[in-house]
Image (cartoon, grey):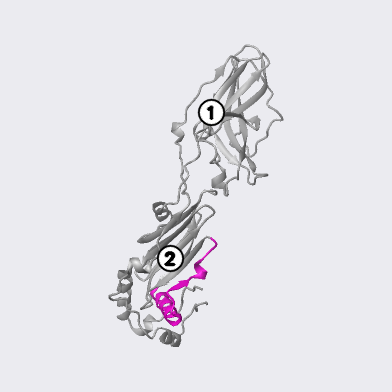
Amino acid sequence: MEYPLVFEEDDVAAELQEELNYDGFNVDDTSKMVPNIHEGPELKIVNIDQTQINKHTCEGNSMVRLLLTGKGKDRNVQANQDTFGSDGEFLNYFFIPKLVFHNKSKEPISIIELSGEYEDSHGNWCECHNIKLCSALSENDANYNWLPDTTLNLEPLKLTTFCVRVDVKVKGTPGSSTKHRTRAHKSLPQPFKIRLTLHDTEGKTASLLVEQANEPFVLSTKEIIRKNFDFENIVAFVYADDCDADDRYWVIIYYEDKSKLRFSFGYSLNGCETKYLDTWLIKDLCNQAKKTATTEIVLDEWNHDWRTITALFDKETFILFGFRIELKTDTSKTRETVLLPLDKIRERLAIEKLQPEDDRILTTYTSIS
């Protein structure tokens, strides 16, 4: 059933003819709550500091040396993923912004091929799917102009800088958002190691090991959400993780002021939806529970595919004492009962009794179903 958005004065008098009385009411935890559950895995985020990345030197007998150059992000290996996969696979791309080919010989040298390998999570070295080269981008360049192959002609005693793209084929599903795709896939180890090897016309080789570290992944914890959305006076924080999509779904309950609780729902840090619980809604819910002699009301308008919010009432007095929050993802499930801060409700009801009756009739109301 749907509750009205607007109360007419006569309706309020009829609906709320019996004042709520929370005085002396206490919750018997053991008799009024089903056990909390938390099933399934939780997200485990491994963050690698860029300063901890090992710097490697070029090895091999070729007169051409490979060197990483640049400062800050120009020196860091960057990552991206296909937006969509195909047949259970997708490409993870790794960009080396500035790789220097230094021909130390007094003679020209040609590079026949630049090949690549990467280390998988088992410590095995696997062939990369593809390697691409293009001239290093300047600040004014908007797009990569990849060369048709990795064959190069290097002039004597000169340094030439290229951008390198290393393609790695990964089994699984690419990240669900830009934040999840601009990184090495979670099935790959961190730091992610790539070994580049050049083959010259003299039959000699040179190789350089480079390492990539993902940008720190911020997990939406209670404290992070509080700071990010500027929430205060938090009553409860309930969450469930989707470990396939690397997302955390959450509900946070907090006081905006002494008159109403806010219920905010979100996933990761991608914004949130908010519903309000003030004393007038509490009174209306209690009256509905008493009329129907029910101890539970599912708040359909507050719910979503991944969450179910249920209001809980005392079986004798039909006073609202808490909410059962159920969150479900593809990999986990959480069920938790949150008790209302009864002392604050008593305080607010006492304040309202001292107000003139006309001031206590609200003209707007948060709707639920």
Residue 52 visible:
yes
Residue type at mark 2 is Arg
Q: Quadrant of residue 317?
A: bottom left
Question: Which residue occupies the extreme right position in the image?
Answer: 148
Per the rendered image, the range of residues in magenta is 278-305
Q: Quadrant of residue 237?
A: bottom left
Label 2 crowd (10 A; few <14 / some 14-19 / many >=20):
some
Picture disc at residue 324: 2
Q: Is residue 328 above or below residue 261?
A: above
Q: Nearer the viewer, mark 1 or mark 2?
A: 2
The image shows residue 96 at horizontal and vertical percentages of 57, 32
The image shows residue 158 at horizontal and vertical percentages of 60, 18
Does the magenta segment cover residue 289?
yes
Question: Which residue occupies the extreme top position in the image?
Answer: 106
Does the magenta segment cover residue 63?
no
Q: Is residue 361 above or below residue 153?
A: below
Q: Is residue 248 above or below residue 369?
A: above
Q: Quadrant of residue 16?
A: bottom left
The image shows residue 75 at horizontal and vertical percentages of 52, 31
Q: Which residue is found at the position 48% from the left and 80% from the top?
A: 6
Residue 341 horizontal side relative to residue 134, left or right: left
Majority secondary structure in the magenta region: helix
